[in-house]
Image (cartoon, rainbow, N blue to C red):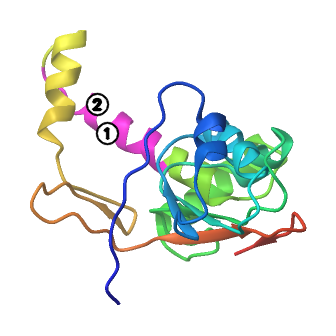
Amino acid sequence: MQLQLQSFQGSGDVCLLGQKLIPGTPAVLLFVGGTPELARFTQGLEKQARQRYIVALADVNLQTLLQMGAARNTPVIATQPVPMVNSSLPVVRQYRDTLARLFDEAPTPLSLAGFIAARYTFEVLNGMEKALTRQSVLAGFQKRTSLNMGGFRIAFNAQQRSGSYVTQSMLAVDGRLIG
């Protein structure tokens, strides 16, 4: 496919970065940042004449993105490294049960990612043999123990960075969620 990576970094307000992109900037942009930064970036892109697609590579909540005033004419694809929220994996069933019991909201990949992160954090902290101090907790997380959490494997390998799941949802130009 002869794809080439170009890096665009802003210093300060990412809205200005979105405004400064030139017509030759690629049509598909990978964005690493949170929901507020992405909203500001799309607001800067709104002033551009060229249509662009944003692939968000971090935890981005598309509903919150809309509420924050993201540009409606810039399609955003949010990725989450978690199973589908309707999966039959035990950890996903536990997530849906907990969500239904405690909150009045629909399951989303972003909240599932938070649920899995919280469960992993609990497991790491629960397995610590030393007193919980800043240093001991940091050391515990640096070990990055692999864990099978209800059918979803969490493992860290510096040489092989891949995941078994990536869920994509797209925020269409008209504000509809496609996923």
Residue that mark 2 sits on: 126
Residue 29 vertical position relative to residue 126 in the rendered view, above or below? below
Q: In which quarter of the image is the C terminus?
A: bottom right
- Residue at x-position 66% and y-position 67%: 52
Q: Quadrant of the N terminus?
A: bottom left
- Residue at x-position 57% and y-position 54%: 112
- Residue at x-position 46% and y-position 70%: 166
Q: Residue 85: percent from the left, percent from the top?
A: 62, 68
Q: Which mark is residue 123?
A: 1
Question: Does the CB distance between marks 1 and 2 fall below 8 Å?
Answer: yes
As helix, strand or loop, the secondary structure at mark 1 comes to helix
Q: Which mark is residue 19?
A: none
**Range of magenta residues:** 116-129
Q: What amino acid does circle 1 point to?
A: Glu
Horizontal side of residue 124 vs 40, given as left or right: left
Q: Find the distance from the CA under tag 1 to the CA under tag 2.
A: 5 Å
Q: Residue furthest front?
A: 23
User: Which secondary structure class fits the magenta region best?
Assistant: helix
Q: Is residue 131 visible?
A: no
- Dot 1, how many residues are within 10 Å of its Cα: few (below 14), some (14-19), or many (20+)? some
